[in-house]
Image: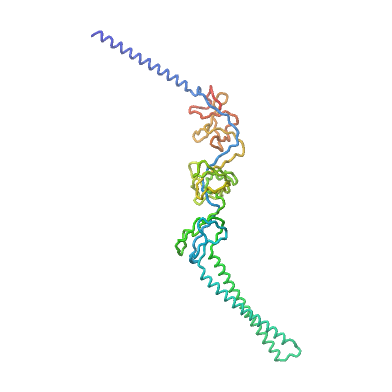
Amino acid sequence: MKRKKVWIPIVTMVGLAAIAMLVIFLMKDRNVNMASTDPQEMPVTVQKAEEKELTETILVTGEIVPEGEQKVYMEPDKGDIIEYKVAENQTVKAGDPLFLYDSSKLNVEYNGAVRERDLIKLRAKAEEAQIAELNKQIAAAKKNPSSESEAEIVDVNQLTQEKVQLELQYENTKSEAASAQERINEATNRKKEMTVVSKIDGIVVKVNQNIAKSETGASEPVIHIISNSPYKVIGTMSEFDSVKIQPGQAVVIRPKVYKDREWNGVVESVSQFPNEDGAGGEMMGAPSGGNVTMYPFKVAITDDTSELRQGFHVSLEVKIVGTEKKPVIPHSAILDEDGMAVAYVLIDGKIERREVKTGSMNDEWIQVLEGINKDELVVIAPSEGMYDGMEVTSFDEI
């Protein structure tokens, strides 16, 4: 029993020694690992800042629309439509008749005005002839003024008075004839309006013959025509894009219904005024945060649009080429430190922290307007442990 008690402390001491050696080994290994991950010992990847005219790609979205369209609504004051002159999918030219209103009442009014005018003209001709006859009689009575008697003088005065009265009546008759002609002209114009014509060259996309007549008119058009000119694209872009995109710039158009297909176009206009609600609108690549005002734009499609349809949604790509060369670096070289853009530059084996001012960018590069010069070695993807003045023993240059 006594021999067993002696072995117990010995085993305990051996176990404690083994544990101590294991702890020392682990601590040593940890220290080795920590030393190997010291930022000064880590390889750093750098790249020279290049000067480039940066091409920025702006993406917006839009909708395909016709060059123009005409929607014709029913006008209740013109009566009923009695005849349609076109059908759906029919091609029309400007001036072609679309449909006719019932003009029977106007025809009666017009014919009555024409008859009245013709009667007045006949009366005017008779009065004109009477005036001419009186002029002859007065001239005959004044033929021999030296032998005029009292009776002859009285006769001349009477004829002159009759002529004056007749001339006044003739002027009134001419005025009546002019009024009758005005009524005819008005009726003629109203008759023309009873035939509704196309105002554009295009295609009839809708003929609605079942619209109910009401005092206020109908909410749907009777005839809908779209221009058969090449389609265009309309949409809205953010205030940030509107100051960069100018008329005449080339555009690549990609309809969402066609994969891997594109059409070429050109920016036709960018409005100086925001759309009606001043904000919103479908947009790609919009800056996040805050309110963004949207501005309407229009793009002309320069390729054949026969395979496109009104209402197709498209994405548009506009490339903006910079006007001057500036140093550019990869996006990964920029860190955001408390709202400040920061980059790290390797100079003579040491890291130098730089606060930089950035400009335009594309998918790969970002312009540096201040803080970095051409050919300086910029650290790509700097680590969190990197600091100003840190020594670097090894680096890789891309």
Task: Give the x, y percent position of residue 63.
Answer: 51, 48
- Give the answer, above or below, for where 39 lies relative to 151: above
Instruction: Determine whether 35 is above or below 87 in the image.
Output: above
Q: Quadrant of residue 159?
A: bottom right
Residue at the farthest top position: 3
Q: Quadrant of the C terminus?
A: top right
What colour scheme governs how the chains and residues are painted in the rendered image of this protein?
A: rainbow
Task: Work out which residue is located at the far left of the displayed protein and give it.
Answer: 1
Along the horizontal axis of the image, is 220 left or right of 55?
A: left
Residue lying at 49% horizontally and 51% vertically, measured from the top left: 277
Q: Residue at x 52, y 68 (%)?
A: 103
Among all residues in the image, which is located at the extreme right? 146
Task: Note whether 77 is above or below 254 in the view shown.
Answer: below
Q: What is the quadrant of the N terminus in the image?
A: top left
Percent x, y for residue 394?
53, 22
The number of discs equals 0
Residue 51 x, y percent position in the rendering: 60, 33
Residue 195 visible here: yes
Answer whether residue 172 is visible to the viewer in this image.
no
Looking at the image, is 91 positioned above or below residue 327?
Answer: below
Q: Nearer the viewer, residue 147 or 29?
A: 147
- Residue 85 at x, y percent in the picture: 52, 62
Residue that appears at 56% across and 26% down: 397
Residue at image position (52%, 41%) is 260
Q: Is 59 or 380 nearer to us in this picture?
A: 59
Q: Quadrant of residue 50?
A: top right
